[in-house]
Image (cartoon, rainbow, N blue to C red):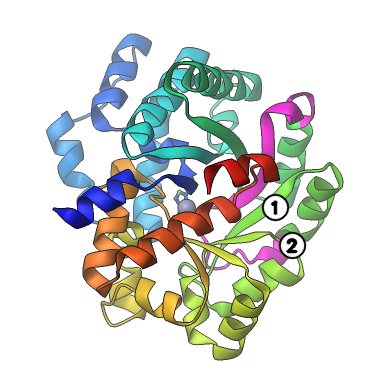
C-alpha cells in the first residue's frame, strides 16, 4: 500500500549491516560447491534454522559457522555485490558496511584476500548499480586486545579502503573498556569509530563506548532506555543510534528486556537520532525496507517519522558534507 510505497521510494543510507550477515543459504551453497566445502542440510533446512534464535550468542554460533565456505577473493566480491544489488532495490544510496576480518584470518584466509574481494564488490557496485559503499572494519570483542591490535596492523596497507572501525560479537562480559587502546590508535590513524553497545548489555556499556572509545555512533543502543539521564545526554548531543528492529525481535531483545515491545517509537519520542538498519538480513528475515515497515506498523509511526529517520541516516553517515547535501 501507500506506506510501502513511501518507504520504498525514500532515499536512505544503511549504517549497520554486517556483510557476513547477508550470506543467504543459496549463495552459501553455491560458494561451498565451487570451493569443495561440505555443508550439511539444504537451502530449506537452513532457512528454517534461521527463523528463530534464543539470543545473540545462539545467532553468532550459526553466523560464524556459515562463514567457513568463504575462501577466495571471488567469494568476498560476490557476497558484497549480491548485497549491493539487493540494497539498491530498497533505494539505499550509500552503505557503510561492517566486515569481521578476524572471522576469516582465524580460519587461515589472508586479510588481503578478504579486503580485496570486498573492495572489488564495492567498485563494481558503484560502477554498475550507482550505489556507494564504504567499509567499517569490526573487531570481535570476544577475542583479545592483542588479536585486535595485530589485525589493525594488517589493515595498514589498506587504509584507503576503510572509513572506520567498529566493535561487534558477544557483548556481555566484553565491555568497551577492553578496547580503549585499540580505538585510540585507530582514531590516531584517521579512522572514524563506532561500536555495538546496549544491545544485550546495559546502559553502562553505552556510556563506556562514548567516554572511553569516543565513538561517533552507537550501534543498537536500545538499552539506553533503562537510564533516563543517558537518554537525555544522547538526545542533547545528537548521538546517532543505528537500530535494527528485526534483529531485536529475532534475538529476543524485545521479549527479554522490553516486555515484547518494538522500542523504535519510544526512542523517537525521547528525541534521539534514530536510524533504521538491517544488521544481518539473511538471518533476521528482512532487508532495510522490511525493517522500516516493521517499525512503522509496530509503533504506529508516520511518513514524517520515516522521512526523519532516512534524513538521520545521511546526517549520521561518514559521507562528505558535499555528498550529504546532495543526498538530503
Ligand atoms: N551484535 C553483535 N555482533 C554481531 C551482530 C550483532 O547484532 N551481528 C553480527 N555480529
Ligand atoms: Zn550488528
Residue 158: percent from the left, percent from the top? 73, 25
Helix or strand or loop: what does disc 2 sit on? loop
Which residue is found at the position 48% from the left and 76% from the top? 223
Residue 35: percent from the left, percent from the top? 37, 12
Residue 247: percent from the left, percent from the top? 34, 57
- Reading the chain from its start, which is encountered first: label 2 or label 1? 1
- Label 2: few (<14), some or many (≥20) within 10 Å? many
- Label 1: few (<14), some or many (≥20) within 10 Å? many
* Residue 2 placement: quadrant: bottom left
Residue 191 magenta-drawn? no
Which residue is found at the position 14% from the left and 37% from the top? 45
Helix or strand or loop: what does disc 1 sit on? strand
Which residue is found at the position 47% from the left and 42% from the top? 18
The span shown in magenta is 156-178
Residue 76: percent from the left, percent from the top? 48, 22
Residue bearing mark 2: 213
For label 1, being within 8 Å of ligand 2 is answered: no
Residue 160 magenta-drawn? yes
Residue bearing mark 1: 193
Does 122 appear above or below 199? above
Q: Are marks 2 and 1 in contact (CB under 8 Å)?
A: yes
Q: Looking at the image, which is closer to me, 321 or 269?
A: 321
Q: Looking at the image, which is closer to me, 187 or 106?
A: 187
Q: Nearer the viewer, mark 2 or mark 1?
A: 1
Amino acid at each position: 500500500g501507500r506506506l510501502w510505497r513511501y518507504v520504498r521510494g525514500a532515499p536512505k543510507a544503511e549504517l549497520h549491516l554486517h556483510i557476513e550477515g547477508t550470506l543467504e543459504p543459496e549463495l552459501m551453497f553455491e560458494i561451498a560447491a565451487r570451493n569443495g566445502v561440505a555443508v550439511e542440510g539444504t537451502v530449506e533446512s537452513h532457512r528454517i534454522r534461521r527463523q528463530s534464535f534464543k539470543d545473540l550468542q545462539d545467532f553468532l554460533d550459526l553466523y560464524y559457522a556459515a562463514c567457513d565456505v568463504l575462501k577466495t577473493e571471488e567469494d568476498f566480491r560476490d557476497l558484497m555485490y549480491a548485497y549491493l544489488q539487493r540494497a539498491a532495490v530498497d533505494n539505499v544510496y550509500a552503505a557503510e558496511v561492517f566486515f569481521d576480518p578476524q572471522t576469516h584470518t582465524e580460519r587461515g584466509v589472508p586479510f588481503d584476500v578478504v579486503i580485496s574481494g570486498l573492495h572489488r564488490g564495492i567498485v563494481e557496485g558503484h560502477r554498475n548499480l550507482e550505489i556507494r559503499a564504504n567499509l567499517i572494519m569490526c573487531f570481535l570483542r570476544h577475542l583479545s586486545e592483542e588479536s585486535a591490535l595485530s589485525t589493525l596492523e594488517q589493515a595498514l596497507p589498506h587504509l584507503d579502503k576503510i572509513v572506520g572501525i567498529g566493535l561487534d560479537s558477544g557483548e556481555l562480559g566484553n565491555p568497551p573498556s577492553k578496547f580503549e587502546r585499540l580505538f585510540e590508535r585507530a582514531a590516531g590513524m584517521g579512522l572514524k569509530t563506532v561500536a555495538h553497545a546496549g544491545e544485550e548489555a546495559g546502559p553502562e556499556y553505552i556510556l563506556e563506548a562514548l567516554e572511553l572509545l569516543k565513538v561517533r555512533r552507537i550501534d543498537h543502543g536500545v538499552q539506553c532506555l533503562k537510564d533516563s539521564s543517558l537518554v537525555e545526554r544522547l538526545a542533547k548531543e545528537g548521538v546517532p543510534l543505528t537500530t535494527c528492529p528485526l534483529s531485536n525481535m529475532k534475538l529476543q531483545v524485545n521479549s527479554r528486556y522490553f516486555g515484547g515491545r518494538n522500542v523504535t517509537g519510544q526512542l523517537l519520542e525521547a528525541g534521539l537520532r534514530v536510524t533504521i538498519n538491517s544488521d544481518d538480513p539473511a538471518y533476521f528475515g528482512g532487508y532495510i525496507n522490511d525493517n522500516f515497515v516493521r517499525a512503522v506498523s509496530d509503533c504506529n509511526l508516520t511518513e514524517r517519522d520515516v522521512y526523519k529517520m532516512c534524513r538521520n541516516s545521511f546526517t549520521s553517515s561518514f559521507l562528505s558534507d558535499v555528498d550529504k547535501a546532495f543526498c538530503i
